[in-house]
């Protein structure tokens, strides 16, 4: 019986084992063929893309993607005229990064406001898009040997973007979406104003449009944001530091030695200290907003630790100011900025008798007079013709005070992320209902169905 039973089981199982083995072999073959097909397509895409890049005028490129990257990634240097109206006046090379997903996919155009951000935007995976990230002229790798300041204008910077868009539309035929964060978001808005047909949709994040060199809407924001208790804690924090300025500055001298920073631009470390104290509420609401983190223990070291974390005195050193020279030049001449309302602190200040500016332009050049005309024109245009723009702001972010209010005359929309700051006002941090509204607006404008990933 045992022998018979064993034989019966063996004979019945053999076809089953054979079919399992056959199925496994076929499955493995399909997987291998799929992998080979994907690899072949990737190689085909790579060869096709590199031929296309090679054929673009004034563009040099280098592949920088890692083996497991989901994108083909290239660094680009693009020859740009200093003056797009007069190309004979010289040129510079503008740095960009291309991340390729597919020739028929949408393309995200990341309009950086400063140095290039090498990370992909949160929008790129949502659209399963290519991304073209562009450094702002006269920052990072995009600086000529000598900076001709007269060519650092918003008109020229947006013309840079238009030229790049014109080049790469020869490669990518899908939808085009421009985006940027902060000054990069400002750039997205200016670009849409000058070249509204270049993109199908613009999505600027936390982008202000200042109405003066000292945009006083920010002072009203400070009077209303958060709770009265939190606003009072901020004021008392500033008062305590200014009351202990002499001792605080002595401690900060050692800090400045360790950081190797200097204070010739402002004139003294004491004046830079007061700038830092005045800046504290602006940066607190811009990036933090946690009122429990504000010291109240009257321990100077605790207060200085918080000051250096929120509004580091290094920002008001020669080295910190020099890093943003090009930004300050534009703020002083065209884009505007903000200042500091000293009224609540005037009796404690040693270095200021009137509201100081937060703009620190280069001192060794003839600075053109500030012209508010561009921002006035842009604001009017956004009200009347600024279609196909989705603005994203944070309810706590200081820059929301200078944000765009969407007119009912245009097909655009603004989202304010609850408790969002300059760093967290993102689609991934929107409440689910707001995310749904965002996706619906994107589809309405572009026809694209996006997939939002909250874990980006």
Image (cartoon, grey):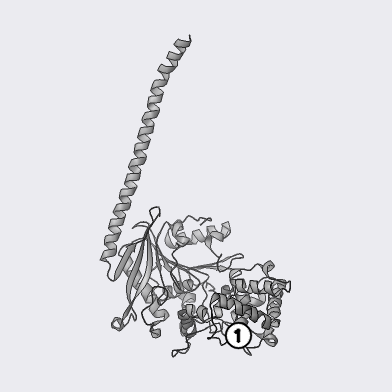
Q: Which residue is mark 1?
A: 271
* Position of residue 366 in the picture relative to residue 29 (left or right): right
Q: Please say if 454 is above or below 37.
A: below
- Residue toward you, 144 or 86: 144
Q: Is residue 166 visible?
A: yes
The mark total stands at 1
* Position of residue 279 in the picture relative to residue 90 (left or right): right
In this view, the residue farthest toward the top is 1
The quarter of the picture where residue 216 lies is: bottom right
Q: Position of residue 262 (x, y in %)?
A: 54, 82
Q: Residues within 10 Å of mark 1 (few under 14, many from 20)?
A: some
Q: Position of residue 58 (x, y in %)?
A: 29, 71
Q: Position of residue 197 (x, y in %)?
A: 38, 70
Q: Please say if 268 is above or below 98.
A: below
The residue located at (60%, 80%) in the rendering is: 253
Q: Please say if 428 is above or below 13.
A: below
Q: Please say if 43 is above or below 255.
A: above
Q: Secondary structure at mark 1?
A: helix
* Position of residue 404 in the picture relative to residue 149 (left or right): right
- Residue toward you, 95 or 246: 246
Q: Position of residue 250 (x, y in %)?
A: 64, 81
The quarter of the picture where residue 141 lies is: bottom left
- Residue toward you, 165 or 10: 10
Q: Is residue 372 visible?
A: no
The quarter of the picture where residue 267 lies is: bottom right
């Amino acid at each position: 019986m045992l022998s018979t039973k064993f034989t019966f089981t063996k004979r019945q199982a053999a076809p089953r084992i054979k079919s399992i083995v056959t199925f496994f072999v076929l499955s493995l073959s399909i997987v291998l063929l799929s992998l080979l097909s994907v690899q072949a397509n990737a190689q085909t895409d790579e060869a096709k893309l590199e031929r296309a890049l090679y054929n673009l005028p004034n563009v040099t490129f280098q592949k920088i993607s890692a083996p497991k990257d989901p994108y083909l990634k290239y660094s680009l240097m693009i020859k740009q005229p200093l003056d797009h109206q007069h190309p004979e006046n010289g040129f510079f090379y503008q740095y960009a990064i291309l991340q390729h997903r597919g020739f028929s996919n949408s393309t995200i155009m990341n309009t950086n406001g400063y140095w290039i951000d090498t990370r992909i935007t949160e929008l790129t995976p949502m659209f399963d898009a290519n991304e073209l990230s562009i450094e702002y002229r006269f920052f990072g790798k995009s600086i000529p040997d000598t900076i001709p300041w007269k060519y650092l204008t918003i008109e020229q910077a947006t013309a840079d973007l238009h030229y790049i868009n014109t080049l790469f539309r020869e490669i990518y035929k899908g939808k085009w979406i421009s985006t940027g964060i902060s000054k990069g978001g400002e750039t997205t808005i200016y670009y849409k104003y000058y070249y509204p047909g270049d993109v199908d949709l613009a999505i600027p994040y936390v982008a202000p449009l200042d109405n003066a060199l000292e945009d006083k809407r920010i002072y009203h924001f400070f009077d209303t944001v958060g709770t009265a208790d939190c606003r009072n804690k901020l004021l008392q924090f500033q008062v305590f530091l200014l009351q202990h300025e002499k001792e605080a500055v002595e401690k900060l001298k050692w800090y400045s030695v360790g950081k190797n920073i200097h204070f010739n631009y402002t004139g003294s470390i004491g004046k830079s200290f007061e700038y830092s104290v005045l800046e504290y509420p602006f940066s607190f609401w811009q990036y933090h907003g946690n009122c429990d983190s504000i010291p109240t223990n009257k321990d100077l070291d605790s207060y200085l630790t918080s000051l250096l974390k929120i509004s580091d005195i290094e920002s008001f050193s020669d080295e910190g100011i020099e890093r943003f020279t090009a930004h300050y030049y534009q703020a002083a001449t065209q884009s505007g900025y903000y200042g500091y309302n000293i009224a609540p602190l005037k009796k404690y200040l040693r270095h200021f008798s009137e509201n100081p500016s937060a703009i620190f332009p280069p001192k060794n050049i003839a600075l053109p007079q500030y012209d508010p005309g561009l921002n006035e024109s842009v604001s009017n245009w956004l009200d009347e013709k600024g279609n196909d723009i989705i603005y994203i702001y944070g309810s706590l972010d200081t820059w929301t005070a200078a944000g765009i209010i969407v007119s009912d005359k245009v097909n655009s929309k603004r989202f304010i992320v609850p408790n969002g700051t300059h760093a967290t006002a993102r689609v991934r941090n929107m409440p689910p209902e707001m995310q749904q509204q965002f996706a619906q607006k994107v589809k309405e404008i572009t026809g694209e169905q996006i997939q939002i990933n909250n874990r980006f």
